[in-house]
Structure formats: C-alpha cells, structure tokens
C-alpha cells in the first residue's frame, strides 16, 4: 500500500519521536458487542499502539438502556476498557450523543503528556434537535501538539451527498472549544474525521459493483464514489487526505453473514427485491494544517514539526454482527515533543499498607496553576480510566508539611486496601482536567489482618465472607 506523508514545518527526523495511532470506526447497528475484539484492536500485532481512538455509530440508545448508560458504562465502553486496561491502556476521554460514541485510550506512560482535554457534540438530525445524526469530538494536546478527533454519522441515502457535505460544514462551524489557541476543529494542527459518513457509489449498477468486489478491482469504483467526487469540488474536503480504498465496501451486509444485502424489502405493493448497493460508507480521513499558522505559533510549528504517515487502511471482515464492517486505520505520528517532563513528580513515602497511615511526596517540576480541587489518586496497576481510583486525597486539605519544593500529603490507613497489590499514584489537576503526574509502580503490602484471615490475592472464596473492608480488590 502506498504511504501518504505530509510535513508541517522544518523536518527534524534526528529529533522526532514516533507514536502509533490505531483508529476504528464502526456502525454497530444497535447490537451488543461481540465477546472478543482482539482482531478489531490488533492485539497480537508486533507493534503496540500508543493511542487507540474508537468511534462507534448506532450504539443502542433505547430509553431504558440510555438512562442506565448515563450512570454506568455502556456495554461497548466496558468491553473495550476491560480489554485494554490489562495491557496498560487508560481511557483518557469519551463522549456520547445518543447512538454516537467516541473513546480515546493511551498507554499509561503517556498520561501526564495528554492535556487540555475537551469533548463536544453537535446534532444535525431533525434540524439539529435530534441526536441520531451529527458529530462528537475530542480535542487534546499530545506532547504539546493539538489534535482533534471527530466521529460523525451523516445523512443516509444515495441522493443526499450535498446534504452530507453541508452537515459536515455545520459540525465544523458549530463545534466550539474553550481554548483560545484552537477554539474550532480546524484550528488544530491535526484533525481526524471519521465515522459512518454515508457516501455511496453512484451511477454504476448493482451487478457491476458486485462484480468489481468479487474480482477485487476496487479501482474501477473509485471514480463514482461520492466522497471522492465531492473532494474534487468542495474546498473544505480538499484539505483532508485519505488512503486508497483497497478493501471491500463495508455496507450493506446481511446480519451474521458475509454476504451483501440479499433481503426482500416490503413495500405498499408487497415484497420486492430492493437490495442496497454496496458502498464505502465508513471512512477515516485526516487533515494536517496547510495554511500559515497564527504569527504567535509560526516559530513553534517550525521548531516542533509534525508528520503523519498512514500504515494501514482496511476493513475487518471477520465481524458480522452488524450490517456494516468495521474500518481500521493505523497511523504513525512523527513529532518533536514540546514537553518531555511531567508537570508534577510524586512518589510514596516509605512502605504502604493498611496497618499504618501513609504519605505521598510530590513536587512541581514546572509552573502549574494549583487548585483546592486538585487531588492525588491511588490506582491499581491496570486501571481503566481516571475515575477508576481505589481512593484519593485532596492535595490542599491533607498537606502535612512542605519543605522547599517537596510537599508531603497524608493518606489515612482506612483508605488503603487491606490485601495490597501493585499500584501507582496519580496527580489530577482540576484546572487542566487531566492527570499531570504519575508515580512509578510500587507495592502496597497486605495488612496483618489480611494475612491472618487468609485474604491474600487469589483467595477469592474468603473475600466476601470475612473481609472487614469494602474496598478489597478482586
């Protein structure tokens, strides 16, 4: 497959770091997730991604399910978190608008360098009053580089290509971030636009399209792909890049089968064989800013270049629970880090166990706007999200001492799990709404009570019968 490259600013290969980004878009047609998503996430690939960005459309949003999903993680989020957390991936952001869901994960080592997180949604369905169509976006700073991910579900049907472009433009215009340097999606250095964009293959008949798919002569269909046609005449689309469509169209399939639509559709006059023509409705595109940056950023972009290279663009045909096949895009981001040290350094002070009160030592490595709402969380190694802490302590309220640049913070033994285990400490900044420092992994020792009562890791049978704490780990 041809590699597509773009360079922003002056190339500095000798100083660039490479990061791997794995993206997925999938219209899941309201079905529950499969038992295994290993192939979807390429978990057995020789290179592990630094970032996962997963956009889903048509996640089931019936009234009862949608209410419960607002309190608990939806089944798709839970499966992805449960799959990735043991591999040291943490969910850094997510946003849902009815059936649209966007999730962003990173390797734990990158957590202190993902900042300025914000998430937004824009409705386009039913004149902007209904969330069945539209876009959800997450923006973040990755080692100082501003990235934005936009997951869209646009208008359906063959005759609405122009409306889809209008909806996309409306999403770009209506989505606003609370960030002076990048208030709009297109202000970010790098934008990924993906989802069920619903563009179809026009003019060609059903038999010709299916023949090209059978013969794998996909190139014969590209000239009539609506998104390809629209990119030639719409300026906003010309700014986006896409890899070649060297994979079968991902819509529309029979459920639980690998055959394209063969159903009979009921009309006023009875049943008719109105089959849906296959199409590449599910896409991943990107835009690296071409226009001159603002004067205050011009020197910065020259000093800190960013390059994007697509390594893989394909559909995953193994999954058949939906009438769409998932599409996967794998990218390499080559960039020079604008920041290479966390804002805060922290570590446990001495040994930790539930037999004694504990202390945390932290210091600010760079100027940071502290807040009374800053806190330090204790996490089990393999935690799934920022909210997946075992316990936390308020930084300002529980300060014991401050000697020079080092601050000592108190943690009550009543908050420490009695069975112990491997864990880390994370400093959460309320002003930045993200983790800005993370400790090395350390051992929390099992308490004497846990040892005496047999509540050691692995002794699950004794857990609920004799535990004296509710915060024991599974």
Image (cartoon, rainbow, N blue to C red):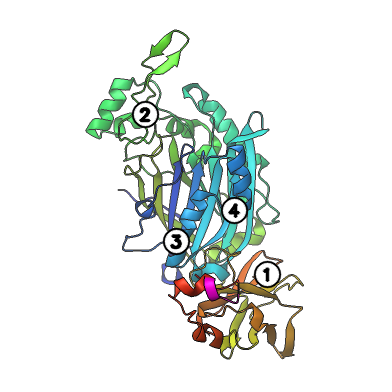
Q: Nearer the viewer, mark 4 or mark 1?
A: 4
**SS category of the residue bearing label 4:** loop
> Which residue, given by chain and number where applicable, does mark 3 sit on?
84
Residue with the most extreme top position: 269
Who is closer to the viewer here, 288 or 25? Answer: 25
Who is closer to the viewer here, 208 or 303? Answer: 208
Q: Which region shows up in magenta?
A: 465-469
Of callouts 1 and 3, the N-terminal one: 3
> Which residue, given by chain and number where applicable, does mark 1 sit on?
429
- What label does residue 72 carry, if any? 4
As drawn, 463 above or below 117: below
Q: Nearer the viewer, mark 3 or mark 4?
A: 4
The answer to whether residue 333 is seen in the rendering is no
Give me the C-alpha separation between circle 1 and circle 2.
48 Å
> Which residue, given by chain and number where applicable, does mark 2 sit on?
278
Q: Main secondary structure of the magenta part?
A: loop
Of callouts 2 and 3, the N-terminal one: 3
**SS category of the residue bearing label 1:** strand
């Amino acid at each position: 497959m041809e590699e597509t490259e773009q360079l922003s600013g002056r190339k500095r290969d000798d100083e660039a770091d490479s990061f791997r980004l794995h993206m997925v878009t999938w219209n899941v047609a309201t079905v529950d997730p499969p038992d295994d998503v290993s192939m979807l996430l390429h978990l057995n690939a020789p290179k592990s991604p630094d970032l996962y960005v997963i956009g889903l459309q048509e996640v089931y949003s019936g009234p009862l399910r949608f209410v419960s999903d607002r309190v608990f993680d939806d089944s798709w989020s839970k499966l992805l978190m449960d799959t990735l957390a043991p591999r040291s991936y943490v969910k850094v952001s997510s946003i849902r608008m009815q059936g649209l869901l966007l999730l962003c994960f990173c390797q734990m080592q990158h957590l202190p360098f993902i900042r300025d997180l914000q998430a937004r949604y824009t409705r386009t369905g039913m004149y902007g009053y209904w969330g069945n169509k539209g876009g959800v976006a997450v923006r973040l700073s990755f080692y100082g580089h501003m990235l934005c991910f936009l997951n869209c579900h646009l208008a359906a049907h063959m005759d609405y290509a122009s409306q889809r472009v209008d909806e996309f433009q409306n999403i770009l215009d209506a989505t606003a971030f609370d960030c002076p340097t990048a208030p709009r999606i297109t202000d970010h250095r790098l934008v990924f636009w993906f989802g069920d964009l619903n563009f179809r293959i026009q003019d060609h008949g059903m038999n010709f399209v299916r023949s090209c798919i059978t013969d794998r002569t996909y190139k014969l269909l590209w000239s009539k792909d609506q998104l390809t046609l629209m990119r030639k005449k719409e300026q906003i689309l010309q700014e986006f890049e896409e890899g070649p469509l060297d994979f079968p169209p991902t819509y529309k399939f029979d459920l639980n089968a690998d055959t394209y639509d063969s159903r009979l559709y009921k009309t006023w006059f009875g049943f008719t064989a109105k089959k849906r023509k296959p199409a590449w409705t599910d896409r991943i595109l990107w835009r690296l800013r071409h226009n001159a940056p603002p004067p205050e950023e011009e020197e910065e972009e020259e000093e800190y270049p960013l390059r994007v290279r697509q390594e893989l663009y394909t559909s995953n045909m193994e999954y058949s629970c939906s009438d769409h096949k998932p599409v996967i895009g794998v990218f390499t981001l080559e960039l020079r880090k604008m920041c290479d040290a966390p804002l805060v350094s922290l570590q446990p002070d001495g040994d930790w166990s539930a037999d004694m009160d504990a202390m945390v030592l932290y210091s600010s490595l760079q100027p940071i706007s502290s807040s009374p709402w800053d806190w330090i969380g204790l996490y089990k190694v393999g935690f799934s999200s920022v909210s997946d802490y075992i316990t936390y302590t308020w930084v300002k309220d529980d300060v014991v001492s401050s000697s020079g640049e080092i601050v000592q913070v108190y943690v009550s033994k009543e908050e420490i799990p009695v069975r112990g285990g491997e864990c880390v400490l994370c400093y959460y900044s309320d002003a930045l709404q993200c983790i800005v420092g993370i400790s090395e992994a350390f051992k929390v020792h099992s308490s004497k009570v846990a040892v005496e009562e047999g509540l050691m890791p692995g002794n699950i049978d004794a857990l609920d019968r004799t535990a004296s704490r509710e915060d024991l780990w599974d």
